[in-house]
Image: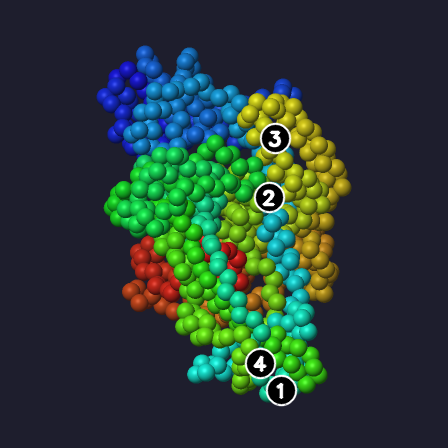
Amino acid sequence: MKNLVIVESPSKAKTISKYLGKDYKVMATVGHIIDLPKSKLGIDVDNKYEPEFTTIKGKADIIKKLGTAAKGKKVFLAMDPDREGEAIAWHVAKALKLKKPQRVVFYEITKGAVNEAILAPRKIDDNLVEAQLARRALDRLVGYKVSELVWKKIWYGLSAGRVQSVALRLIVEREKEIEAFVPDEYWDLYAIVQHKKNELKAKFTKKDGKKNIPGSKDDVEKIKKDIGKNDLEVIDVQTTAKSKKPYPPFSTSLLQQAANNLFGFTAKRTMGLAQALYQAGYITYMRTDSFNLAQQAIDAARDKIVEQYGEKYLPEQPNYYKSRSRNAQEAHEAIRPTDFNTSDIQVKADLGPAEAKLYKLIYDRTLACQMKNQQTEVLTVTCEVVGKSKAKYEFRMGGEKVLFDGFRKVWKASSEKDEEQLQQISEVQKGEKLENKKLDAEQHFTKPKPRYTDASLVKALEHYGIGRPSTYATIISTVQSRGYVEKKARFLHPLDVGRVVNEFLMKNFASLVDYEYTAEVEEKLDLISEGKVEYAPFLDKEYKPLVKDIKAADKSVEKNDVVILGKSDEKCDKCGSKMVIRLGRYGKFLSCSKFPECKGMKSIDGGEESIDLKKYKKPEKCPECGAKMLLKNGKYGQFWACERYPECKGIVPMLLHEKCPESGHHLVERRGKWGKNFIGCSGYPECKFIKKVKAEKKSEDEDGDDE
């Protein structure tokens, strides 16, 4: 073999091997081979921020094998087509001491794309590498230095990453909005009217030409009393044509949002599935913020539309889309299938059902984006009734009729319109009198914005220009793995420690968690990749003010200022001093105000009263020593612990009263690989029983569109 092709993934290597001839050997690095050291800063701040890279543990053998294979061969570096891929290629070239490495780039792993790239290699792009090194160095400087202070002022093991801290701020601030929200009462008032044989429902909208929403039952009763039994007159009937454009093809963020809204996939799982599809050659590169499609892909999609749905669904000219995301890199393509003749059935047989599900979503979205608009007809009937006070009350009713489904033939709407009611309303004529049968009212209260889901947080990160497509899933996973945020029924809830860390950062490192500042950093990294900003001056400008803030916070902030959340009326059982509410690793608790001299402590929130003892089984005594068991909070939630801890370390999980039908052991709530909760046998792994539960309904408060 004369040539060696090096990629990151064994799966990618396997796919590429099918497309290259006998003269090519394909090998994988299995991810990064070189990185900054874990045990120290690894950035020489006194020498132009030179990174001190080391070989990742376990990768020395891979480097050795690659070096042996590269001898006497022409080496092609075919890592992913982004900054991280460019950096991996650069690391490999340095590690193997390659004199003339050939960098090849393709956005889909197909025979044509791979062979075309091999015929047009280029040099490693130093600007792209420098941009990635700058991101890595800045993240290390911020994460390492600020985290050291967080350890000192709160406790060891916490972190304060550059981008994760901004995401945490978003989640915490949304929670504060929800807590501070004061609901307003309002009422919907409807007139139930008779038209011929049909009973119709019209909604009150205006009084004397001005928008009016009743704010109380008294308001409603006054309107009802004024209108009485007076009939309504139809004063306007309007028919409006409406054209709905197709949605754009998928960028990374839109794919993550759609997969979360439709399937409940986390951002992390979506990217894992997309990575498998890409490496198997089924879709184009899955980290992109572009809506562009290659001309051959547009042509193939248009041919498929005609073949499957007919000429009437094909627009005269292709549809083009411009990215709305801040800092979008339009050079890339959107995510699309590499071959429209490949079905999800084939993908399912090759990779599995979850991959097939995501593939079909990408396939349908790409076809739909090149189809004609949906055409609908919107009918609005406006009625008026004059009250006893001579006030004029306006009521409206309406509906929408689909004239031509267009792209909705493939990309279905999330709700269907009531065609029967529309048909009834369409028979109403201007000038007609409608018999007022009765007035109905419904009480409502305004609701706060919903908590973030994976989908809506990705949308917010993209809106503010925070992070890049490759980082969204990692950001969301990190704030959860650090214990700052937990997911409940798809919604992200900040935990006490997350609130405290956020408050600490907001008070002492305002620029670090500022949305505009974070977006500006991304813009500067883009300029480095274009050769317009230099590595060392960029880091110097970011690092020196950070050091200044760290020194100021270290001097001015005491640990108790951060971890003591308030006073308590409780007294310490050990010394009689007043107790304070203190934040510990696993939540809030009562601590003696004389700590560390006195280590008296108590559970908070009433202890056992905070749980449902009809659902959970309370252990009678410690299984180790027979002493009383107390409810405790831990890293993975609540559990029962011996009152004699630390002398006795007996613990019991939160067992349910319900028993396993197979083993007779009590059932227990667990968390799965992808973050989903389930109920299984406490006798695992001997018994692998899992209780089947109905899927949670999506909350009506959850934001998102029909994508």
Q: Earlier in the sequence, mark 1 or mark 2?
A: 1
Q: Position of residue 257 (x, y in %)?
A: 47, 50
The answer to whether marks 1 and 2 mark residues whose Cβ atoms lie closer than 8 Å is no
- Residue at the limit of the structure toward the left, as seen here: 22
Report the residue marked by disc 1: 228
Q: Position of residue 9 (x, y in %)?
A: 36, 32
Marks 2 and 3 sit apart, C-alpha to C-alpha, by 15 Å
Marks 1 and 2 sit apart, C-alpha to C-alpha, by 52 Å
Residue at the image position 46 percent from the left and 22 percent from the top:
91
On screen, residue 432 versus residue 574, left or right, reads left
Dot in front, 4 or 1? 4
Q: Earlier in the sequence, mark 1 or mark 3?
A: 1
The answer to whether marks 4 and 3 mark residues whose Cβ atoms lie closer than 8 Å is no
Report the residue marked by disc 4: 232
Relative vertical location of residue 216 with respect to residue 635 in this rendering, above or below: below
Dot in front, 4 or 2? 4
Report the residue marked by disc 2: 464
Q: 677 or 220: nearer the eye?
A: 220
- Residue at the limit of the structure toward the right, as seen here: 556
Marks 4 and 1 sit apart, C-alpha to C-alpha, by 11 Å
Assign a secondary structure to mark 3.
Answer: helix
Report the residue marked by disc 3: 524
Relative vertical location of residue 437 with respect to residue 5 in this rendering, above or below: below
Three-letter amino acid code of the residue under disc 3? Lys
Q: How many marks?
A: 4
Q: Quadrant of residue 383?
A: bottom right
Mark 1 surroundings within 10 Å by alpha-carbon count, few (fewer than 14), some (14 through 19), many (20 or more): some
Marks 1 and 3 sit apart, C-alpha to C-alpha, by 66 Å
Q: Earlier in the sequence, mark 2 or mark 3?
A: 2
Residue at the image position 60 percent from the left and 33 percent from the top:
523
Q: 303 or 215: nearer the eye?
A: 303
